[in-house]
Image (spheres, grey):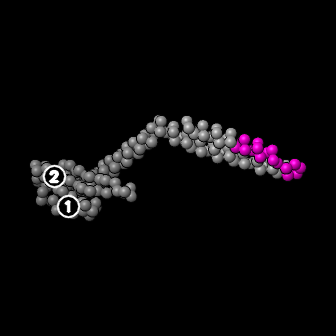
């Protein structure tokens, strides 16, 4: 709690400085203005010191409790969940597009990644089909390229 000690010392120094300056104050009408200026200085000094101390204390508490690691872990989990949900939705969409053309695939795998700009991109698509559908391989590739801008790897289950 180094911040509390520093704040206490700064407040004491300001109070002592104001007391010493108060000994030199003029009398009469100027005394009220001088007292006002000293009061404002003391209040500003205390507020600034308290603000700096509270920020420092907050950082120390966060470090002690490990809140930064918790926030980073929560962000990682959130990002992973978004990627997984996006991948599931993209697989479902591709599956529906192929089913509309009467193409029933056995499985679809997608590799989805985030970019530095927080964009999501598809890096790879693997589509597994039965040998009977191999004659429609070019059609599957065309549908996938038109809708996802990625050339898929179409594999039969036997060589999969």
| Residue 130 drawn at (x, y percent) | 13, 51
Please tell me in which quadrant of the rendered image residue 151 appears: bottom left
Element type where label 1 sits in the image: helix
Viewer-proximal residue among 156 and 50:
50
Crowding near the residue tagged with mark 2, few <14, some 14–19, many ≥20 C-alpha atoms within 10 Å: many
Viewer-proximal residue among 100 and 155:
155
67 horizontally vs 153: left or right:
right
Residue drawn at x 29%, y 56% as measured from the top left: 122
Q: What is the magenta segment's predominant secondary structure?
A: helix
Residue drawn at x 15%, y 59% as measured from the top left: 137
The magenta region covers 14-30
| Residue 76 drawn at (x, y percent) | 38, 45
Residue drawn at x 26%, y 56% as measured from the top left: 123
The N terminus is located in which quarter? Answer: top right
Please tell me in which quadrant of the rendered image residue 14 appears: top right
* Residue 152 visible to the viewer: yes
Find disc 2 in the rendering and name its residue.
129
Q: CA distance from mark 2 to mark 1?
A: 12 Å
Mark 2 vs 1, N-terminal side: 2
Q: Which mark is on residue 105? A: none
| Residue 27 drawn at (x, y percent) | 87, 48
77 horizontally vs 108: left or right:
right
Please tell me in which quadrant of the rendered image residue 72 appears: top left
Magenta stretch containing residue 20, yes or no?
A: yes
Asked whether disc 2 touches disc 1, contact meaning CB atoms under 8 Å apart, the reply is: no
| Residue 26 drawn at (x, y percent) | 85, 50
* Residue 85 visible to the viewer: no
Element type where label 2 sits in the image: strand
Magenta stretch containing residue 44, yes or no?
A: no
Find disc 1 in the rendering and name its residue.
141
Viewer-proximal residue among 146 and 28:
28
């Amino acid at each position: 709690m180094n911040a509390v000690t520093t704040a206490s010392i700064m407040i004491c120094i300001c109070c002592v400085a104001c007391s010493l300056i108060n000994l030199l104050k003029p009398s009469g009408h100027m005394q009220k203005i001088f007292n006002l200026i000293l009061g404002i200085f003391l209040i500003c000094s205390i507020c600034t010191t308290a603000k700096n101390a509270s920020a420092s204390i907050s950082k120390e508490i966060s470090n002690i409790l490990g809140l930064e690691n918790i926030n980073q872990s929560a962000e990682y989990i959130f990002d992973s969940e978004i990627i997984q949900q996006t991948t599931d939705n993209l697989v479902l969409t591709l599956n529906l597009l192929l089913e509309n053309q009467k193409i029933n695939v056995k499985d679809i795998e997608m590799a989805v990644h985030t970019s530095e700009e927080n964009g999501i991109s598809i890096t790879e698509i693997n589509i597994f089909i039965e040998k009977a559908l191999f004659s429609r391989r070019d059609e599957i590739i065309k549908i996938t390229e038109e809708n996802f801008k990625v050339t898929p790897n179409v594999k039969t289950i036997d060589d999969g």
